[in-house]
Image (tube, rainbow, N blue to C red):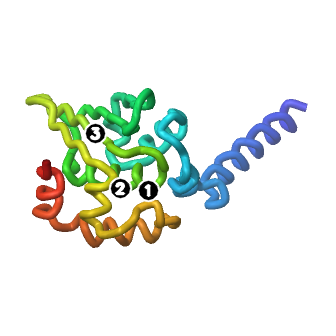
Amino acid sequence: MRKTFAKAVLLSTALLVMSACSPLFAAEEPDLFEYEGAAVGNNSAVLNTLNRLPGAEHLTGFELETKQQPYGITASYDWEEATPSDKETAAHNATYLFTLIDNVEWVQFDFDTGAGVEQYRLTREQLQAWYGVDLTGIDEQEKLEELLEQYLDEGQKIDALLTQP
């Protein structure tokens, strides 16, 4: 009886380990367009979107402005240990937020670098003019990533975008 039980436990453990390594159980790439059409007032959709964007591991909080228009989002990051560019992260994440959240008109990113807080505020109108594209018309993640690749490779363009009044 003991031998049978030990064999069953060993077999169960082996199957568990093998199934955990199986590609069938591999985590899927998150689909950010799951929240397309969300509103600023849906803090769950905003949080889930922010948690799937670059810099999410440094996100310390966010605030939603929903009491009066224009509606907006402020995201705060602890950027002391971060290696990516805060400016590129702000432009990238703003692009996703304006594409996915219908009624957001401005976004602000506060990056606490340890030496101070770098703050970037972008409006939907400003970003769409920069791209020359209506972001609400983009309905696939691949199309949005192509647009980002075209514009986010040039640091001077991003600097110009983020220093506009």
First in sequence, mark 3 or 2: give its number.
2
Q: Residue at label 3?
A: 108
Q: Residue at label 1?
A: 99
Q: Quadrant of residue 78?
A: top left
How far separated are the C-alphas under marks 3 and 2?
12 Å
Label pair 1/3, CB-CB below 8 angstroms: no
Residue name at image x 53 percent, y 40 percent: 45
Q: Position of residue 43 (x, y in %)?
A: 51, 33
* Front in this rendered view, residue 49 or 114: 49
Q: Secondary structure beneath disc 3?
A: strand
Q: Quadrant of residue 110?
A: top left
Q: Is residue 93 left or right of residue 120?
A: right
The amino acid pointed to by label 2 is: Thr
* Front in this rendered view, residue 112 or 80: 112
Q: Residue at label 2?
A: 95
How far separated are the C-alphas under marks 1 and 3?
15 Å
